[in-house]
Structures are given as C-alpha cells and as structure tokens.
Amino acid sequence: MTIHPSNTVLVEDMPSKSISSTGAQIEFRAVTKMYGALAAVRELSLTVRQGEFLTILGPSGSGKTTALMLLAGFIAPTSGDIRISGKSVGKVPSYRRDQGIVFQNYALFPHLTVRRNLEFPLEMRGIKAVERAEFTDRMLQRVHLEEFGNRMPSQLSGGQQQRVALARALIADPPVLLLDEPLGALDRNLREQMQLEIKRLHKEFGKTTICVTHDQDEALTLSDRIVVMRAGQIEQTDTPQALYDRPATRFVANFLGEANIFDNPGFELQSDATPSTGTVAMIRPERISVASVDAPKRPDAERRQFVTGVIADMIYAGPLRKYQVLVGNSVLAVREHVASDQQIFGAGDKVRLDWLRSDLRFVKV
C-alpha cells in the first residue's frame, strides 16, 4: 500500500500546536479485520508500553501490515477496539491520531527542499515561521543533515532520504511513531547503518514505536520486544534474546534465524530438559562446534553431546564458514566464525560435532 502524506493531512483537523514530550501506551483489544471471508487479522490483543520499540515480524500474509494500517487509521477494524493513552481511536481518522509515520518509499514531497519537507507538518499545526525555522534547524542537526536543508530529495542518497523521512515524522513530537518496512529500499550495508541510527533516535526521543518488517536481523537489532505473527494471529511475543534462544514453536524457530530441527535424527539425543508431548528438539547452528574426530575434547565434555558425521558442503561467507554435515538421518547446519588458527574442513571430511545439552530446545510442532 502506497500512501502519500498529502492524503493524510487536513489543516483544520490537525491537533493543536502544543507539542507532547512523551510516548503513549497502545492497546489492541481483540481486533479483527475481515476481507470477505478472509481474516487478515484475527482477535489481535496486544499492549505496547509507553516508550517501547516493538517490532511486528512475519512473512507475507501474516497480518503485520494490516495491524499497522489499523493503528494508523488507514483501515477500520471489523470488530474489537484500539486504544491510545486509554482512549479509543477506532472511529478517529488517520489525520487526527497525532502519529508520525515513515513508509518504505519515504513519501517525501519531491517538489520541496529538505527544509520545506520538515517544515510542512509544523506549518499544518499553525507553528509560526520563526519557530518552524528553529525546530527545523535543531532537527537537521539531530539527524546530521544540517548541510542538506536546501537540497531536493532527488539529490540525496537513500540513507539521507530515510533520515529526512524520520526527521519529518519526529519533528512535531508525536507520541507514537509508526515504521512500515522503513529500511526495505536500502542495500545491506546502509540498512545496518540506519538500524543504528534509528536505535539512536529512539533512545533520544523516547517515542512509542511500532515497526513492521520481514527482516529478522532488523527486528533483533532494533526492538525491545518482537511480535511474531502468522496467519493473522500472534505466534509468540518476547524480547529478541528470548525469542531467539527460546522459541515456543517450530514456526518461530525457523522464521527467526536458522534452526536444526530433529524430526528423525537417526541417533539418540541427550538433553538436560524433559520434552513435552507434541514437541520436537531443535538447536541453533552456531551452538554446534566442529572439530576433527581425533581432536582433544573440551574441559566441559561431561555437559556436551558428541556425534560424528561427514561434511557434505562448506560455504565461505566472509566472517562465517557454513557447514552442512551428514549425521545419522540428519543434515545439520553448523555456523563457525572464521579465525586464523581454525582448521578448515571440506566435502567428504569426517568430523566430530558437539554441543551443550542445555542448548537443545523443545518447540511445539
């Protein structure tokens, strides 16, 4: 969905020119959005704490973008309620919700300079010209674009355009900031730089922020909490570390990072935990160590499981070596950080794998 800022602003309906200084608590209360017989979002209940950075993560069709559009007011729920700072906004149009929004395509005004793009939301709020200039100067400094105020958006790099979009969303100090795939148009190196920039700005401004993305690395880097959605419902919500280290379901384990799932391993698994009914064992590739079969065992060998296998493939990926290892009935993915003194294995080499028994997790099928 492409939405241009000119479609979301009416002068007479803008909030007053008083500017807030804090975030807001957001609540989804059993929100459902139907498109005919299809539920894009089904019974969504979620509370976003004031000042929190929450990311909604999921594949295409999971309902993550629909949830954001419901909160933004661009579509209306079929049932349920959405509250911001304790007040229902279900019937409040988008241009009266006092939210800053950054879209994937940035939606900058191409015919206005960077400075005028930033001044626009302030002008719509009735802020005087002198104050607008002061606000804009400060914001340009905060996003490190003070030398680019007189340039047109087409004269900026992708990362600079992204910073302008963020600055415009933040300049009127809204209590809520919404990010719709904010880094999707950038290359990998620039995405990583902008992740740090967004994290810095969130820490500085303290806005309640909801970000929608399908990029797992982005979600892990930016978020206080992550909501993983699937088929219009929440699969799991937790901190990035907890979601990655302790996924509740097979879907979360596979979607957030990479996982070795032991459906039929062909060897006996050893674990410090007792599996529950309806679960399957999994382990992350970076938790597995690879060594030659005759290498000395680690000092904590009594806490580890050891298996032997054969290298099926090795891929050099910069800081990582990615191994595919045949063990029993399984092909295990192993990720090893490159170091100068490490032994390198190739296809056909017999190796020994080991991992801490406590690193084995059990997830719902």
Image (cartoon, rainbow, N blue to C red):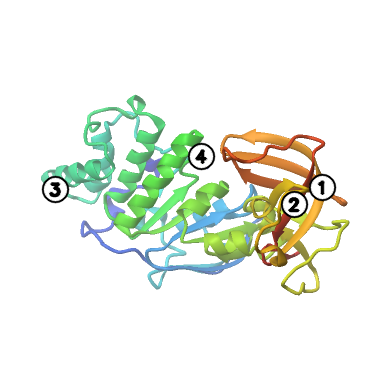
Marked residue nearer the N-terminal end (1 or 3): 3
x, y percent for residue 230: 66, 57
Foreground pick, 83 / 249:
249
Amino acid at pointer 2: Leu
Amino acid at pointer 3: Glu
Residue under label 4: 184
Q: Is residue 193 visible?
A: yes
Q: Are marks 1 and 2 in contact (CB under 8 Å)?
A: yes
Q: Nearer the viewer, mark 1 or mark 4?
A: 1
Instruction: Give how far apart the Cα atoms at labels 1 and 3 are.
Output: 69 Å
- Per the image, label 3 sits on a secondary structure element best described as helix
Q: Nearer the viewer, mark 3 or mark 4?
A: 4
Marked residue nearer the N-terminal end (1 or 2): 1
Instruction: Give how far apart the Cα atoms at labels 3 and 4 are.
Output: 34 Å
The structure residue drawn at horizontal position 43% and vertical position 45%, both measured from the top left corner, is 195
- Per the image, label 4 sits on a secondary structure element best described as loop
Q: Is residue 5 left or right of residue 335?
A: left
Q: Nearer the viewer, mark 3 or mark 2?
A: 2
Residue under label 3: 131
Q: Quadrant of residue 123?
A: top left
Q: Quadrant of residue 287?
A: bottom right
Report crowding for label 4: few under 14, some 14 to 19, many 20 or more residues within 10 A (C-alpha): some
Instruction: Give how far apart the Cα atoms at labels 2 and 4 are.
Output: 37 Å
Marked residue nearer the N-terminal end (1 or 4): 4
Q: Are marks 1 and 3 in contact (CB under 8 Å)?
A: no
Report crowding for label 3: few under 14, some 14 to 19, many 20 or more residues within 10 A (C-alpha): few
Viewport quadrant of the C terminus: bottom right
Residue under label 1: 309
- Per the image, label 2 sits on a secondary structure element best described as strand
Instruction: Give how far apart the Cα atoms at labels 1 and 2 are.
Output: 7 Å
Residue under label 2: 353
